[in-house]
Image (cartoon, rainbow, N blue to C red):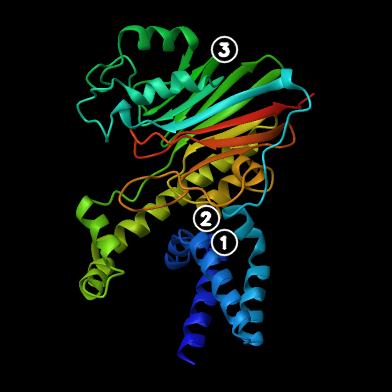
Amino acid sequence: MILRIISFILFILTLLSAFGGRINPMYVMLPSALTLALPYLAIATAIVSLAWFCAGRWITAAIGVAVLVAAWKPVSTAIPLHFQSEPTHKERTFKLLTYNILHGWDQEDPEMKAGNRSFQYVLDADADLVGLQELVDINDTGEVPRLEGTLRDSLLRKYPYRAGTTACDLKVLSKYPVMLIKEYPTFSHYEVKMPWGKLNWINTHLSSFNLTDEERKVMKEVVSVKDTEAGLKEMKGSIREKLKDGFSRRAERAAAIRELADRISGPLVVSGDFNDVPESYAYRTIRGNDLGDAYAETSFGPLITYNRHGFLFHLDQILYRDKFMKALKVEKGSLKSSDHYPLLSEFEWIAK
């Protein structure tokens, strides 16, 4: 009976996490917080349902399966079951890299003995379009260490077109002519003159929770019996307020991005550090009914794009207007110089 109760609680949490992104976090925070755990709750529900099936408890197992069926659409976004595809016209493909580059710093090699590994990755990835977050001025050696000599020359030669002002921490590098249309708080709008037509591109860096290292430690330790009581008290205080504020600010900026996307009728890509997961309220607001998810449509299994503090979340997204383009693949880089992994995507242009 105790195991059944625990299972039913898991099933309920899975449903709440699957549909929590439909509830505005400005009013209720808990559903948004649960969306962060959607892949893990869904996998746990699948395992528990299988265990009940093997134990011959058909009704409990069937309830678990029913939960997964009911939540299948959001679950399939967080845990896609697709594979990359080949282009119909290879000559009409392009690659787009999105990367929260952490100002070019290296958290694994603070003294930068191996040089600037982040920008070396950008150079080696050879994407046609590069959207960077957390970069104010690529020419500032005080901000960007060890970007010098051959690396710098090769990077600027490969990407002769660059856009973004020092008033914003969003920058783009391009092999094709690119023009900054406007910078907004937490996102920027560009137009890229592709060989086949004009591409509108929104590079994003939505608000984080701004948790201190100590607060992150509390969140990690709250699952242990020893620290649960103290952790929960802290969760009800400053941490809870920061979580609520982060969800609310992202919801507000997501609405502004969606409003801009609605004014753009042609090819469009929205990429960058959302600081939120697939099926979250901010994600769903930006995606709307007309944008596809490049990772969800070309990949298999859940994705983790943040690599610090034990927060294993898919925070970096690549959305696109699939009426004009087809996503072919998305690959996550393994480099840990930044606290985010780079994401390299490939598209085929099908717009007339």
Give the farthest residue toward the bottom. 1
What mark, if any, has residue 237 been given in the picture?
Answer: none
Q: Name the residue under label 3.
A: 177
Camera-side residue: 137 or 86? 86
Residue 106 position within the rendered picture, expressed as x and y whole percent measured from the top left: 28, 31
Contact, mark 1 vs mark 3 (Cβ under 8 Å): no
The reply to whether dot 2 and dot 1 touch (C-beta < 8 Å) is: yes
Residue type marked 2:
Tyr
Query: Would you identify the image quadrant in which residue 268 lies?
Result: top right
Q: From where the camera sits, is residue 215 visible? A: yes
Nearest to the observer: residue 58 or residue 271: 58
The amino acid type, in three-letter code, at marker 3 is Pro
Name the quadrant of the C terminus. Answer: top right
Q: Is residue 22 above or below residue 142?
A: below
The residue that appears at 45% across and 34% down in the rendered structure is 342
Residue 59 image point, x, y percent: 65, 87
Residue at 23% across, 22% down? 113
- Residue denoted by label 1: 22
Q: Which of marks 2 and 1 is nearer the N terminus?
A: 1
Distance from Cα at disc 1 to Cα at disc 3: 38 Å
**Residue 245, position in %: x, y?**
35, 55
Question: Judging from the image, what secondary structure is the residue with disc 2 in?
Answer: helix
Instruction: Provide the residue designation for mark 2.
Output: 281
Name which quarter of the figure residue 150 lies in: top left
Q: What element carries label 3?
A: loop
| Figure check: 349 above or below 161 | below
* Nearest the eye: 77 or 238: 77
| Other residues around mark 2 within 10 Å, as few (<14) / some (14–19) / many (≥20) | many
Indicate left or right for 179 with 29 as reference: right
The Cα atoms of the two marked residues, 2 and 3, are separated by 34 Å
Lower sequence index among marks 2 and 3? 3
